[in-house]
Amino acid sequence: MKQTKSIKASKQRGYRAKAPLHKKMRFMGCRLEARLKDKYGRRTIPVRKGDTVKIMRGEFRGGSGEVTRVDLKKSCVYIDGVNIKKTDGTDVARPINPSNIMITDLTLDDKKRIAMLERGLKE
């Protein structure tokens, strides 16, 4: 699947919707907090389960919590404590777009993620 260079919003939406999962992971990039940005020399990083995030936009703005699930097919993140009530009274996790959150603490239990962060370190 080749990358789109179109300026048409409908073609861009189609590209994002039909992209394979290994490319959708690139769409899951989130801003890093200033402290982490200075430490790792990166502005964004893909969000993962276990990261602590702060919600910057939407009805849950200002809230924070741990990422419980990352859904690549829907390109959304589920955060602990961010729930909405259904009409029958049950609580359901509210999906959040990764562009609306900021990572405040990283999970560093993966060797590949640590290696990726070390590549961006300033000498």
Image (cartoon, helix red, strand yellow):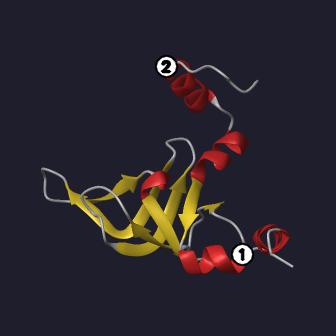
Q: Nearer the viewer, residue 19 or 37?
A: 37
Where is residue 55 shown, x and y percent of the image?
Answer: 38, 65
List x then y, in percent, for residue 100. 42, 56
Q: Tell me whether the residue at label 2 lies in contact with that at label 1, contact meaning CB atoms closer than 8 angstroms.
A: no
- Residue 75 percent location from the top left of the image: 52, 45
Residue 78, compared with residue 13, is above or below; it is below
**Spatial CA span between label 2 and label 1:** 35 Å
Q: Which residue lies furthest to the front in this view?
A: 123
Q: Name the amino acid type tagged 1.
A: Tyr
Q: Residue at x 33, y 57 (%)?
A: 57
* Residue drawn at the location 53% of the way across and 57% of the way down: 70
Q: Residue at x 82, y 74 (%)?
A: 118
The residue type indicated by label 2 comes to Ser
Total marks in image: 2
Residue under label 2: 10
Q: Report which quarter residue 107 is drawn in.
A: bottom right
- Which residue is tagged 1? 40
Q: Which residue is drawn at 45% across and 62% down?
A: 101
